[in-house]
Image: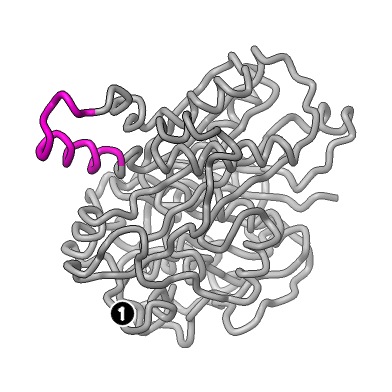
Amino acid sequence: MVVTGVGMHTPAGAGLDANWQAMLAGRSMAGPIQRFDPSALAVRFGCEVRDFDSVPYLGPKESRRVDRGTQLGFAAAADALADAGEIGADPARCAVVAGTGIGGLITLEEQVRIYLDKGPDRVSPFFVPMMMPNSTAGLIGIHFGWTGPMLCISTACAASANAIGEATRIIRDGTVDVVMAGGTEASLMAPAVAAFARMGALSKRNDEPTLASRPFDQDRDGFVMGEGAAFLVLERADRAEARGARVYGEIAGYGTNSDAFHITAPSQGGAGAAACMQLALDDAGLDTGAIGHVNAHGTSTELNDAAESEAIRKVFGDLSPPVTSGKGVTGHLIGAAGAIEAIIALRSAREGLVPPTGNHIQTADDVVPLDVVHGTARSIPKAAVLSNSFGFGGHNATLIFLPAE
């Protein structure tokens, strides 16, 4: 399976080039929340997608009838399809697999307020389709005229990585020829920020938000909430070659499992994550020496970074490859994180260049020693990249990418 089109709308901007440059610079996109008044919250900053306009993609009428997460997701998918060029596939053999951790949370908050303040007769008739997590997959299929499977994956922060992995499976088994796979999330709203802060998951650096997300750093104190979307066009290598498509790289391996340990905490010692990485390596038919670098989940939380570090060392031993995390730049985009990081990993593999981990200064004492790339980007030989995504509930997903020849 190869990737022939990509699209993304993130706090770092629209499109791969803008995001790639932000990653290479290690430049944080965090800042005071602007879309709503955060003054009553313990955490008042995040990574917002600024200046996004869905009207050029959906028109004014339909834009009002879909949640912000669906707007972002559809825009990213439309950009990915345009990037892929004329795919020339039977619509019945084209599918969508879209991931989201939460769905239309902004719509849910808005409509509950309307119900409480103005009564049931003022609730939008579009409330349910705007809120439902599968709306992005459905909208993409409707607009593209694709009649193959339209699936929604909701495995928290692993959702879009699982979406990409499951997309490869339905191409492999011959169900479809082309899949639009990725994810979207727009849950940056007051109750969600309050809830994550209450559980101790968020950084509380209100006075220095651009320094807040510090993956694997000794002074990390939590993640920074973000929003955004990314989608990839996947197809068989032979049909991509036949139509002369540009190829970003190959999805060579996929592993997924669960910790069966705790609803929010990772399994002790990163056992589940380590097993998941090994599943992906086995699926790709690669040994650890073939991996050029690890694109880590690296959220900047105390437990996640420590557990993932132990997992990486369990799999790779003392020969651990360079490790990076993009969440120091974009924050944590929940269900969209895996897809955004997949696109960056593909670019990294193709360029032989590992972006630095934003805000990483010194590896923490509670983290098993890793070669965390920080400060500046690092040139490495072109090789496979392993990308991790882990989610609340104990969901694990690992993807392995090979650079385009």
202 or 14, which lies in front? 14
Image quadrant where residue 287 sits: bottom right
Tag 1: amino acid: Arg
> Magenta span has 119?
yes
Image coordinates for residue 261, horizontal then vertical, percent: 24, 49
Q: In which quarter of the image is residue 380?
A: bottom right
Q: Position of residue 41 (x, y in %)?
A: 19, 67
Q: Nearer the viewer, residue 49 or 400?
A: 49
Q: Majority secondary structure of the magenta segment?
A: helix
Question: Is 64 drawn above or below residue 185 in the view shown?
Answer: above
Location of residue 91 in the rendering, given as x and y in whole percent from the top left corner: 67, 15
Residue 150 in view, yes or no: yes
Q: Residue at x 61, y 69 (%)?
A: 23
Left or right, 150 with respect to 402, comes to left
Q: What element carries label 1?
A: loop
- Which quarter shows the N terminus? top right
**Image height check: is 235 above or below 309?**
above
Image point (67%, 69%), residue name: 21
Q: Which residue is drawn at 44% across and 68% down?
A: 309
Q: In this view, does 118 lie above or below 285?
A: above
Residue at 45%, 55% in the rendered image: 274
The residue at which mark 1 appears reads as 205
Give the vertical position of 265 relative to 102 (above or below): below
331 drawn magenta:
no
Residue 278 visible in this rendered orientation of the protein:
no
> How many other residues sit within 10 Å of disc 1, few (<14), some (14-19) or many (≥20)?
some
Q: Where is residue 80 in the image (x, y as percent from the top left)?
A: 67, 40
Range covered by the magenta-colored residues: 107-123
Circle count: 1
